[in-house]
Image (cartoon, rainbow, N blue to C red):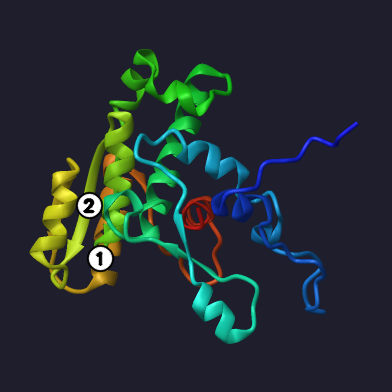
Amino acid sequence: MVPTSKPAETPSETLANHRPFLLRNRSPGLEQAPWWCDRNAGNEPLRLLQACPRYAPTSLIPLPHTAEKLGLGEIWIKDETQRLGIGSFKGLGGAYAVLKLAMKHVERRTGRSILPAELSEPGVRSMLSQLTFSCASDGNHGRSVSAGARLIGARAVVYLHAGVSDERAAHISRLGAAIVRVAGDYNDSVEVAAKAASQDGWIAVPDTVGPGRTTLLARLWSRGMRY
């Protein structure tokens, strides 16, 4: 019998099937490796992000001449210039957090687990249309949160400090978010956004956490950033 040959992997498949992971914890002060070192850490956020209509694996570009000069077999670089139309991997984190939080909201309301595809069902969208997601941003995070909210039919409110350009504000506004300008710097906008979310019962989606704190939102955001 002649063995059946396996089709060659595409660059994207190679990257997905050979994710780096921590082989050994070399830090004596740590009892276990962080979650992001696990080979399968990206499976769940990847499934959720694939529900986004414009999601696609990042293109890989070969650099054969550079590889030859360095004496390496192959070098590939990730081309982020087309990432969700905003030219940044940061377009994934906030959207992923919104989708994940939306699923948790529906699960609490219905008492059952749901699949990412169910976020587009009329009954589910009716529940989600009542939600408002809010954040402070310098630009990219606000666009991501706004895109996630628009995808599920929810509302988004983004707080921008005085240093954020009108161009960045326009990008966010075009995604359907309400813009609130805050006097001062980024920290001022974070404070105002947190206070408003607490008062109005909105779902806050911050892109930072305070010293010594690790929150669910921070973990969700950072996981989404990676894929």
Among numbered discs 1 and 2, the one appearing first in the sequence:
1
Task: Please state the horizontal and vertical placement of residue 85, each as a whole percent of the image.
Answer: 27, 51
Q: Report which residue position mark 1 lands on.
A: 138
Task: Please state the horizontal and vertical placement of residue 107, each as a whole percent of the image.
Answer: 52, 25
The quarter in which the N terminus is drawn is top right
Q: Report which residue position mark 2 lands on.
A: 158
Q: Is residue 190 left or right of residue 164?
A: right
Whether label 1 touches label 2, CB < 8 Å: no
Q: In which quarter of the image is residue 36?
A: bottom right
- How many numbered circles does the render carry? 2
Q: In which quarter of the image is residue 166?
A: bottom left
Q: In this view of the protein, which residue sits in the foreground, 86 or 98? A: 86
Helix, strand or loop at mark 1: loop
Please identify, in this view, whether the residue under mark 1 or under mark 2 is nearer the observer: 1
Task: Please state the horizontal and vertical placement of residue 5, each as a whole percent of the image.
Answer: 76, 40
Amino acid type of the residue tagged 1 in the rendering:
Asp
Q: Residue furthest left?
A: 166
Q: In this view, does 181 lie above or below 56?
A: below
- Residue lying at 37% horizontally and 13% vertically, measured from the top left: 123
Tell me, yes or no, if residue 93 can be seen here. yes
Helix, strand or loop at mark 2: strand
CA neighbours of label 2 inside 10 A, class few (<14), some (14 to 19), many (20+): many
Q: In this view, does 192 lie above or below 57?
A: below
Q: How far apart are marks 1 and 2 (CA)?
A: 10 Å
Task: Please state the horizontal and vertical placement of residue 177, each as a whole percent of the image.
Answer: 19, 44
Q: In this view, does 121 lie above or below 65?
A: above
Tell me, yes or no, if residue 202 can be seen here. no
- Residue lying at 17% horizontally and 40% vertically, measured from the top left: 176
Q: Is residue 79 left or right of residue 226?
A: left
Q: Is residue 138 above or below residue 111?
A: below
Amino acid type of the residue tagged 2 in the rendering:
Val
Q: Which residue lies furthest to the right in this view?
A: 1
